[in-house]
Image: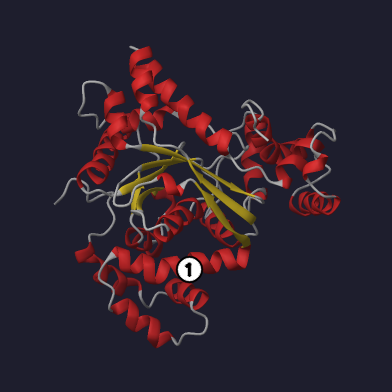
Amino acid sequence: MSKFDTIRPYYDSEVNEGIRSVIHHPMMKALMNFTFPDVDENVWIEQLQKTHSIRDFQINFVYHSVQKVLQRSSEGLTTSGFEKLEKNASYLFISNHRDIILDTSLLNVALYEHGLVMTASAIGDNLVKKDFLYKLSKLNRNFLVQRGLSPRELLQSSKLMSEYIGQLLLRENRSVWIAQREGRTKDGNDATHQGVLKMLGMGCDEENVMDYFKKLKIVPVSISYEYDPTDALKMPQLMAEAKNEVYIKEKNEDFITLLSGIMGQKKRIHMHIGDVLESEMDQIKTNEDNSNRQIQAVAQVIDDSILSSYKLWPTNFIAHDLMYASNQYNHLYTEEEKSLFERRLEMKIDSTNPKMVESFLAMYANPVTNKMKYQNAF
């Protein structure tokens, strides 16, 4: 038994058996009917039964599912920066986190279309408690981040995950996607949690962790949705935090959020690939001799890349103007766009609750505030 068996996706030798175990599940049928509405059920069943690798499953099935989602729930995905990446090279993509499934699915769609190495992607085990979702995640090259652990278990789990990520990147030439923080950003403030970087550093086989990070080829990724499909669903947690209350999730909340993120309206989506962080690691190694300060500096470099390249939409400027009762950015949106946004706000939340309105607006306005810190931001 491999030490990574508790967290790893299927090996290709296990894919066909994994597919056969879920092929008649009602959710697989729903997924295939959504993806291939004009194809007879026997056709896709036969194709699935002939599938023996994750790559084939992703290209022949998942890729088309994501295209269908884009078609039904968005006005399309645009990308920038992919031309900087080398074919057949593996990268560690560290991304801001807006949507549980789509962030990583859209990255893989773009990597595939650019002829680049697709990723193994981290997913919280809280999201795949249902057996079907667990098997589907293993078929889609997800590896598990174990949640709800004691401090001692968390340390062991972090070491295992760090080792596994190193194995993928440095020995299997497999790219990896990981979010810059645990859980999705709910208030629009994208920030890299140092705990994520410390976890990555646990697999270090160099004298200095900066040399190890350089080997991993870290690439910051910024993804922005014109409309956040789960904006209203984030409200209860934001309200609890505003009152300093502990937020307890409802039963099936993660699953409902997962489905809403996939099928909710997003309008336009943009994904930007930053530069590989190499010279930055050398600089940090030279300037900082304390490992904690080095980790802080790496987090800042990732944040700078994500925040400065974040694509702002009319919704962001409208929210900023509404929040601060100004017309500072009214040249960047139309009256029609503004009234659509205001209608969404009224439909999604209790607009008589000032705190709730403020939290909703902040979710869209904060990326503007964050980007203002950079020269030539707009």
Q: Helix or strand or loop: what does disc 1 sit on?
A: helix
Rendering coords of residue 47 (x, y %): 33, 80
Taking depth in this image into account, of 163 and 332 the one nearest to the observer is 332
Q: Please tell me how many numbered marks the rendered image carries.
A: 1
Q: Quadrant of the C terminus?
A: top right
Residue at 48 percent across and 45 percent down: it is 81
Q: What residue lies at 39% left-to-right and 65% top-to-bottom?
A: 132
Residue plotted at (28% across, 37% down):
162
Q: How is the image coloured?
A: secondary structure
In the shown orientation, is residue 299 left or right of residue 224?
left
**Residue extending farthest left:** 1
The amino acid type of the residue labelled 1 equals Ser
227 displayed left or right of 35: right
Q: Residues within 10 Å of mark 1 (few under 14, many from 20)?
A: many
Q: Is residue 64 visible?
A: yes
The image quadrant that residue 336 belongs to is bottom right
x, y percent for residue 291:
33, 17
Quadrant of the image occupied by residue 158: top left
Can you say whether 279 is above or below 187 in the image? above
Residue 192 appears anywhere in the view: no
Write down the quadrant of residue 321 in the picture: top right
Above or below for 10 versus 304: below
Please provide percent x and percent y for residue 309.
56, 38
Residue, disc 1: 65
Q: Nearer the viewer, residue 282 or 210?
A: 282
Q: Work out whether residue 319 or residue 161 is closer to the camera in this orientation and state it.
A: 319
Q: Residue at x 47, y 85 (%)?
A: 39
Residue 203: percent from left, percent from top: 24, 32
Give the camera-side residue of 359 and 319: 319
